[in-house]
Image (cartoon, rainbow, N blue to C red):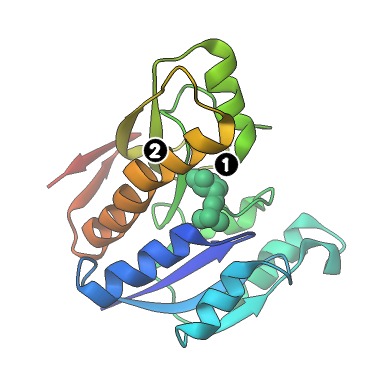
Amino acid sequence: MINVAVLVSGGGTNLQAIIDAVNSGKITNSKLSVVISNKDDAYALERAKINGIESKLIRKKDYSTLEEYGEAMIECLDSYNVDLVVLAGFLVILPENLVKHFEGRMMNIHPSLIPSHCGPGYYGLKVHEKVLERGNKVTGATVHFVNEIADDGAIISQKAVEVLDDDTPEVLQKRVMEQAEWNILPQAIDDFANGRLKLEGNIVKHI
Ligand code: GRF
């Protein structure tokens, strides 16, 4: 059984999908040990509470350097013996020491088909606005391991979603969540927890 931590900043619908997947047995061999938020008003914290999952508030602004913030995060995560860190809408610049500490054990969900519409500044609705501005006919979501460069780590899984002519960023965001994010993130956690992911350089093989 692996210990999983989920890091959040907002509504936590991906966290909810993970909780539901653990409860329904879609994710096996995994315990949701702790939810960490950098925002005290993140609704994701409420979801953790409702589901009896421990949560912590660790804010960048309470530390003078990014490194100290990273140390605090590592200390907290290690105190729960966390095996896998899942970034599910965690809108914080990641401390290098944190990324190093969890190399090959930290995954992120991004709401586009990487390498399209990703990297610094591409988060939340902005991603879907760019998809519509560019006139993409297909978008989707990507789960990837985290390295020191934003949205650059090895890709674990992707799912395509159709873009429709009359989409707004909000409508498209909802479709990408429903059809892609809430499926591929729990699946990636289950694959990791059951030893089905093998990292070879920057390529993930499913075994
Ligand atoms: C999702 O679109 C996720 O892909 C992105 O941030 C959003 C978080 O949404 N990284 P929620 O907090 O899980 O509802």
Does any atom of ligand 1 lie closer than 8 Å to the CB of label 1? no
Q: Quadrant of residue 190?
A: bottom left
- Alpha carbons under labels 1 and 2: distance apart: 17 Å
Callout in the foreground (1, 2): 2
Q: Residue at x 22, y 47 (%)?
A: 198
Tell me the amino acid under the disc marked 1.
Glu
SS state under label 1 = loop
Query: Where is residue 52 shown, x and y percent of the image?
Result: 47, 88
Relative to 50, does residue 132 appear above or below in the rendering?
above
* Crowd band around label 1 with a 10 angstrom C-alpha radius: few (<14), some (14–19), many (20+): some
Q: Residue furthest front?
A: 166
Q: Is residue 39 left or right of residue 128?
A: right
Q: Is residue 115 above or below residue 100?
A: above
Residue at the disc numbered 2: 142
Marks 1/2 in contact by CB < 8 Å: the verdict is no
The x, y position of residue 3, in whole percent, is 37, 76
State the residue position of label 1. Answer: 148
Residue at the spot x=25%, y=65% of the render? 193
Decide if ligand 1 comes within 8 Å of the CB at mark 2: no
How many other residues sit within 10 Å of disc 2, few (<14), some (14-19) or many (≥20)?
Answer: many
Closer to us: 39 or 180: 180
**97 and 13: which is toward the camera:** 13
Residue at the image position 60 percent from the left and 74 percent from the top: 45
Screen quadrant of the N terminus = bottom left
* Callout 2 amino acid: Thr
SS for callout 2: strand
**In the rendered image, is residue 191 in sight?**
yes
Left or right of residue 190, residue 129 in this image: right
Q: Please tell me which residue is depicted at 40% across the width and 58% down the height of the picture.
A: 105
